Image (cartoon, rainbow, N blue to C red):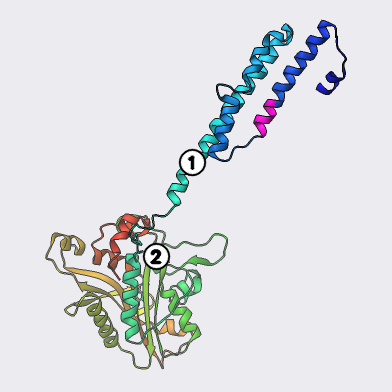
């Protein structure tokens, strides 16, 4: 438009002259506006130049204000609005670039390493108490020839119950509250690691000497004493002429390795569908402190596992000849032993993953 204006020959009628002037002022204000918008200072020096040009005491917007009187009164308001927009655009841009340069500077400060600083310490992770106890159990049994068997947590009804002599209508099913899987007919979360016994026996012929550590699930109300998930280590030994004396001696060996050379155990008659006879094993914990009284309910003895001679029916269910072979089995809870060893009062601590709790096991192996 200014080009068109330049073509016009003077002298011009006053009114037209004013209009051209007016257009000229509007145009230069608009040019400055787009200049401000497209300028992008990236250094402190460029930003300072920007400030001087658009916001300094001799900035280029100022003279435009002086033209106000020349603008036709009807357009004066629009002109004023345009100049104000110029000013605020320049101010906002300045502020925004200044902020971003400042934050760059502080970031730079943070990431520049101090080469003279002494090396920081690396925080070592700690083993989880359940892991520590489980690994100790595994290593005790591995040393006497048991091998590791790992198997699934999502099990079928047959391996978890039926093979283990607990058919559907068997009252012993009520001993374990089971999570059945809604969309998988006949499948469940294993309620005990005894399911691995069935897995191993259906795949291998004796001699069998395995331990099976792992997680198990039961639909129990979560409290300080019980949880809906916990860990067990299962043991299974099948060969010719395996006797109850072998079982007892193996468990005594375990207790001495785990709780010290003076550890004592006792076996109380019990019932499990998959063993006959069955027993529960207590370890002598002592009655020296009040905590001992509380933990052992005043008896000094603490139950740590179930065990027994594998029921001949279980061997038969799994394709092993009970006339030729016999065996023993045991299943122990890990959480309970971890609570004991570390004097942890609430089982829920073991599942919360609170680092303040976990850090305390740094020195444990
Ligand atoms: N499976 C049993 C439970 O979870 C524990 C158990 C008892 C396992 C006796 C065994 C056994 O192998 O022989 O309560």
Q: Is residue 286 left or right of residue 32?
A: left
| Quadrant in which residue 81 is drawn | top right
> Could you tell me which residue is drawn at 50 percent across and 70 percent down?
155
Q: Nearer the viewer, residue 113 or 49?
A: 49
As drawn, which residue projects farthest toward the front?
A: 10
Q: Quadrant of ligand 1?
A: bottom left
Magenta-drawn segment = 32-38
Ligand 1 lies under 8 Å from the Cβ of mark 2:
yes
> Could you tell me which residue is drawn at 39 percent across and 65 percent down?
176
Q: Is residue 191 above or below residue 325?
A: above
Callout 1: SS: helix
> Could you tell me which residue is drawn at 57 percent across and 65 percent down?
185
Q: Is residue 226 left or right of residue 190?
A: left
* Residue 279 placement (x, y as % from top left): 28, 76
* Residue 274 placement (x, y as % from top left): 39, 77
Residue located beneath label 2 in the image = 176
The answer to whether residue 192 shows anywhere in this view is no
Residue located beneath label 1 in the image = 103
Q: How many marks?
A: 2
* Residue 340 placement (x, y as % from top left): 24, 65
Quarter occupied by the C terminus = bottom left
């Amino acid at each position: 438009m200014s080009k068109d204006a330049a073509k016009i020959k003077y002298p011009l009628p006053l009114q037209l002259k004013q209009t051209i002037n007016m257009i000229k002022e509007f145009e230069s204000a608009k040019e400055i506006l787009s200049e401000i918008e497209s300028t992008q200072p990236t250094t402190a020096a460029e930003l300072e130049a920007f400030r001087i040009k658009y916001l300094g005491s001799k900035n280029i917007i100022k003279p435009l204000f002086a033209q106000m009187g020349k603008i036709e009164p009807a357009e004066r308001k629009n002109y004023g609005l345009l100049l104000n927009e110029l000013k605020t655009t320049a101010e906002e841009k300045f502020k925004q670039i200044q902020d971003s340069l400042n934050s760059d500077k502080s970031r730079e400060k943070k990431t520049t390493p101090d080469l003279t600083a002494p090396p920081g310490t690396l925080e070592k992770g700690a083993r989880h108490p359940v892991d520590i106890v489980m690994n100790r159990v595994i290593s005790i049994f591995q040393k006497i020839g048991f091998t590791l068997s790992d198997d699934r947590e999502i099990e079928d009804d047959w391996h978890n119950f039926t093979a283990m002599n607990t058919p559907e209508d068997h009252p012993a099913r009520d001993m374990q509250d089971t999570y059945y899987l809604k969309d998988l007919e006949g499948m469940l979360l294993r309620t005990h690691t005894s399911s691995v016994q069935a897995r191993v026996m259906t795949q291998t012929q004796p001699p069998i000497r395995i331990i099976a550590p792992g997680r198990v699930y039961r639909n129990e109300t979560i409290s300080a004493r019980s949880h809906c998930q916990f860990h067990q280590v299962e043991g299974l030994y099948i060969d010719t002429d395996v006797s109850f004396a072998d079982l007892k001696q193996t468990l005594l060996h375990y207790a001495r390795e785990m709780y010290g050379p003076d550890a004592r155990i006792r076996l109380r008659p019990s019932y499990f569908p998959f063993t006959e006879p069955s027993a529960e094993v207590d370890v002598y914990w002592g009655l020296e402190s009040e905590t001992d009284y509380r933990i052992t309910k005043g008896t000094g003895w603490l139950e740590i596992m179930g065990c027994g001679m594998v029921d001949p029916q279980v061997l038969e269910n799994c394709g092993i000849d009970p006339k030729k072979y016999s065996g023993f089995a045991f299943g122990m809870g890990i959480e309970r032993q971890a609570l004991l060893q570390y004097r942890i009062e609430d089982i829920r601590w073991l599942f919360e993953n609170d680092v303040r709790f976990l850090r305390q096991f740094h020195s444990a192996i």
